[in-house]
Image: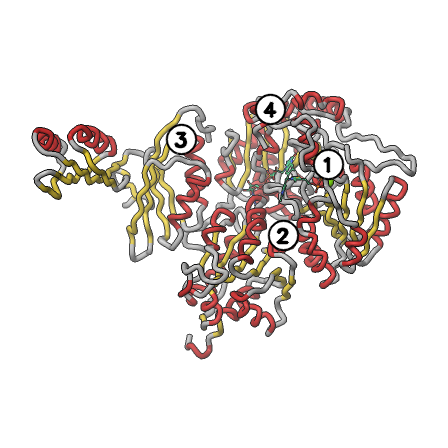
Amino acid sequence: MPAETMQSGAEVLLRALKDQGVDVVFGYPGGAVLPIYDAIFNQNAIRHILVRHEQAAVHAAEGYARSTGKVGVVLVTSGPGATNAVTGLLDALMDSIPVVCLTGQVPTHLIGNDAFQEADTTGITRPATKHNYLVKRSDDLARVVHEAFYIARSGRPGPVVIDLPKDILIGKAPYVAPVATHRSYRPRTEPDPAQIGQAVALLKGAKRPVIYTGGGVVNAGPAAAAALTRFVRMTGFPCTSTLMGLGAFPASDPQFLGMLGMHGTFEANLAMHGADVLLAVGARFDDRVTGRLAAFCPGAKKIHIDIDPSSINKTVPVDVAIIGDAGRAIAELTAAWEADAATPDRAALAEWWRQIDAWRAKQCLRFTQDMAPGAIIKPQYAIRRLHELTRAQSKDTFITTEVGQHQMWAAQHFGFEKPNRWMTSGGLGTMGYGLPAAMGVQLAHPDALVIDIAGEASILMNIQEMGTLAQYRLPVKVFILNNQYMGMIRQWQELLHGSRYSESYSNALPDFVGLAESFHATGLRAENVGQLDGVIERMLASDRAVIADIAVDPAENCFPMIPSGAAHNEMILGPEHEDEARGITDEGLVLV
Amino acid sequence: MPAPDNNHLRSATISVLVDNESGVLARVIGLFSGRGYNIDSLTVAPVDDARGRSRINVVTSGTEMVIEQIKAQLDRLVPVHRVADLTREGPHVAREMALVKVVGTGDGRVEALRIAETFRARVVDTTIESFVFELTGATEKLDAFIELMRPLGLAEVSRTGVAALARGTRTIGGNVT
Ligand SMILES: Cc1cc2nc3c(=O)[nH]c(=O)nc-3n(C[C@H](O)[C@H](O)[C@H](O)COP(=O)(O)OP(=O)(O)OC[C@H]3O[C@@H](n4cnc5c(N)ncnc54)[C@H](O)[C@@H]3O)c2cc1C
Ligand SMILES: Cc1ncc(C[n+]2csc(CCOP(=O)(O)OP(=O)(O)O)c2C)c(N)n1
Ligand SMILES: [Mg+2]
């Protein structure tokens, strides 16, 4: 291409983004990326959303990506811009969220000189990304951008960083069109028929089966979730989900046992413990899920479907490994199940359901709400009312969360019927995730109802994004379960550290109503149960951003709970069993 | 697929064919240090300039489950073309080279030279009170030689780390036909 007809690197970059279908970029300017901002100024195809902190840009991109299935895009400057983005990148890596993050860099001839706002961004982000690039030659620029999108969204999705020296952005660069192949990176999506056959044989012979689904089903797309739902109903097997998989199988379905793991239901965890065949789909046997490994699903033959071979046999050895896309694998399993002449053991299955129903009868999520109008609000009740009142309106509802007890109560008490409606920071557990993530969701779904279920401590970690909500008129609702404590920390201190509440009290909290108003949003507060429904209704009726500050019982703990180092059948069901946690061993105490 | 054995430690010589782009070695080393895997030896050099490929050879140890995890993690790196577990995939040859400096005079010096001959080490530098031996062979052979030199004035050692290939027609890209 003759040099005159070539565009600047920044223009080539924007053209590549456009050809990748990008419509929104979350970013924050700085010296190293000014050429990109100039190119943005001169076009209309891509909308730039100015966040208030680079970490929030990445979480917003995650929310956008998780709620649409598309790649979220971030643009930050060199040095502090890039380092501020690192938490978000690692969050996206741990939760397998496709993000492309463009970082500015000092010009190539200054790299390594400790130049102004220089950081070794590829070095710093190497363990926080699926892959990263430093573009040193203009000739590579367009190809690298296309590759980055392909890598971010394919296989096991994840974040990709492209570090862009300023001279590359200013100098002329050639353009090349997208290609969806790579020299060395080739994710495996098609399952092996032999493994499918073995899986069906095990499943048909099962007497106490459990299907354990995870975030990988959401990654695989809505069609995979629909295929999973059909498969579960066809087999009649019980189904449980990880925190990350909620919504892939409808919560209201009688075959759904609720979430499993540390704060999972009694029936889900005991079913896991008693199972003879386990089918894991797009789930990674996380320590929050397995509890003590030696006692995890002791009697079960295990089948594991995962697109990433490194997820298989990582912590739990399995009997049948199916490497491939969850949607493809479920489709093949369904076909093989139907083609197979053997009939499942319906009598054993009926017996298994009788057992599960007995566990269910414990009503492990029950709580007591005093309904006298002045009574203190139980956090679980606040979530239940939020769920019921949102269900009563017609908008598509998306929930994000911060991290802590409120996150677990949201997972337990808000029923998710569809995939991509629930965004939470699972793997990294990043406080401050929920508000910016909600922002990204709302941008992708302008007419939807988007609620960040928050804790009063977490929300302060990215509270500056209220400014972004105001600027772009994003009507996100922040629903704070204000227990005046870092409740999750307080709970562990109570149960495991002799009630020594070291530094876990939320002192000197802002007036959240006044805070909302100063950010041009609506502030509401519910002090007692009599005010709760009214506040929720006003929040839902508002077409503006709202902070609803809900005063909840500061002493409430989140149950059931499997204490660290315990097994699924050693769950603490409620306050009456708290002593069991106090007997925890030193081995358990070292666990997070 | 049978579940891997989680009780016994084994050593594994793993070869990794990579695009020799910048940062690729840092990715491999970072993976080992970040995930707490052992590196007993590591070598890297370009092996195919035309296609821009380098070969990394890593000797590591762990339970079967850990070694399978190491291979899967390596294979997940974007610039990695192929990961071969030479220890598992069939017979292989593994060699390294050492330069060994021995300083001394008198009987020790004579004995060092005699042992060097039995090991087929070459003398690549000599002064009246020192030798530098060059020795190529299996890791154990080099270890043995260095141990024998210790009482004879061993002063310094420089080793290349292991280079390894499958025996026969097999290559890291598959069978050559
Ligand atoms: C305070 C707190 C408490 C928590 N408590 C719990 C708890 O009680 N229970 C719980 O479940 N979690 C809990 N978590 C979350 C937990 O830490 C993990 O994030 C979560 O369990 C992981 O979910 P997952 O196994 O579905 O895997 P994900 O992290 O969602 O990973 C997805 C898996 O699917 C695979 N995959 C991706 N795409 C595809 C595809 N297309 N096809 C097939 N496979 C694919 C990936 O390779 C990966 O193995 C908690 C988190 C916090 C912060
Ligand atoms: C960035 C970050 N720092 C620290 C933690 C550890 N942590 C987990 S939950 C929690 C308390 C959260 O308090 P709050 O937001 O009020 O939620 P609650 O548990 O009270 O519902 C803390 C400090 C974390 N997850 N993330
Ligand atoms: Mg709190």
Report the side of A480 relative to A226 (left or right).
Answer: right
The N terminus of chain A appears in which quarter of the rendering? Answer: bottom left
Q: Is residue A429 visible?
A: yes
Q: Quadrant of the C terminus of chain A?
A: top right
Tell me residue A183's x, y (percent).
41, 54
Residue at the far right: name it: A373
C-alpha distance separating marks 1 and 3: 39 Å
> Can you give x and y, in whole percent of width and height, for residue A202 in the image?
56, 28
Tell me if A478 is positioned left or right of A310 in this view. right
Return the residue at label 1. A412
| The quarter of the picture showing ligand 2 | top right
For disc 2, the marked residue is: A59
Residue drawn at (43%, 35%) of the image:
B68
Q: CA distance from mark 2 to mark 1?
A: 23 Å
Who comes first in sequence, dot 2 or dot 1? Answer: 2
Q: Nearer the viewer, mark 4 or mark 1?
A: 1
Residue A239 visible to the viewer: no
State which chain disc 1 sits on. Answer: A
Residue A233's quadrant in the figure?
top right
Residue in the image at 63% along x and 71% along y:
A44
- Which residue is identified by label 4? A276
